[in-house]
C-alpha cells in the first residue's frame, strides 16, 4: 500500500506553506502585515527581518522541490514500485522537509550544515523515487520483451 505516500503530497504542500504562515504571523504580531498587500516587503527590525527572510527562503525552497517530489510519487505508483518502498521514501522526504523548515527558520541554527543536510536528504529521496520508477519501468519492459 502507498497510503503514506499519497498522504505525503498534501503534507508536503502544508510544509511548503508553513513558513509563509509563520512569516505572516511574525509580521502581524509586529503590526507590519498588510493583508491588502501581503507580499509587500515590510521592515520591522534587523532581528525580525532576518527571520522573515528565512521564512520566505524556506517557503520558496519547499515549493521548488514539491513538483519533482509529487511527480516522482505518481511515477513510482504508476509503474508499480512496491508500496512499502514508496512509503519509506515518502517518509524520508517528509521528515527531511520538516527538519529543513526547523533548520532554516530557527534563529538558533545559524550554521548552514543542518539545513543543507536536510535539503540533501530531501533531494536524495526525490532522486531515489525517480530511480526506483525507472528501474521498475525497465524491469517491466524487459519482461514484455521476453513474452
Image (tube, rainbow, N blue to C red):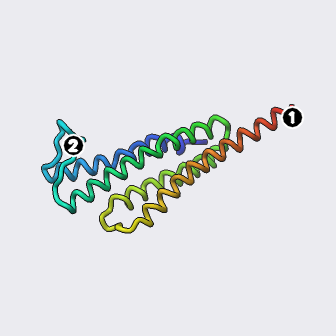
* Mark toward the viewer: 2 or 1: 2
The label number, if any, that marks residue 125 in the structure image: none
Q: Earlier in the sequence, mark 2 or mark 1?
A: 2
- Quadrant (top left, top right, bottom left, bottom right) of the C terminus: top right
| Quadrant assignment, res 80 | top right
The label number, if any, that marks residue 40 in the structure image: 2
Residue 15 visible, this angle: no
- Quadrant (top left, top right, bottom left, bottom right) of the N terminus: top right
Residue in the picture at 51% in, 52% down: 93
Classed neighbour count for the residue bearing mark 2: other residues with Cα under 10 Å, few (<14), some (14–19), many (≥20): few
For residue 113, above or below residue 10: below
- Answer with left or right where residue 125 lies relative to residue 53: right
- Answer with left or right where residue 86 lies relative to residue 34: right
Q: Position of residue 123 (x, y in %)?
A: 53, 52
Residue beneath disc 1: 146
Q: Position of residue 136 (x, y in %)?
A: 71, 42
Residue 1 visible, this angle: yes
Amino acid at each position: 500500500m502507498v497510503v503514506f505516500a499519497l498522504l505525503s503530497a498534501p503534507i508536503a504542500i502544508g510544509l511548503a506553506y508553513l513558513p509563509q504562515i509563520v512569516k505572516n504571523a511574525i509580521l502581524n504580531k509586529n503590526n507590519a502585515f498588510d493583508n491588502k498587500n501581503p507580499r509587500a516587503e515590510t521592515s520591522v527590525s534587523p532581528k525580525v527581518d532576518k527571520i522573515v527572510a528565512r521564512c520566505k527562503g524556506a517557503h520558496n525552497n519547499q515549493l521548488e522541490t514539491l513538483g519533482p517530489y509529487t511527480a516522482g510519487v505518481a511515477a513510482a505508483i504508476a509503474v508499480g514500485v512496491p508500496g512499502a518502498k514508496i512509503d519509506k521514501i515518502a517518509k524520508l522526504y517528509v521528515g527531511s522537509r520538516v527538519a529543513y523548515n526547523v533548520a532554516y527558520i530557527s534563529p538558533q541554527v545559524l550554521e548552514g550544515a543542518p539545513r543543507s543536510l536536510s535539503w540533501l536528504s530531501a533531494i536524495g529521496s526525490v532522486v531515489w523515487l525517480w530511480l526506483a520508477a525507472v528501474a521498475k519501468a525497465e524491469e517491466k519492459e524487459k519482461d514484455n520483451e521476453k513474452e
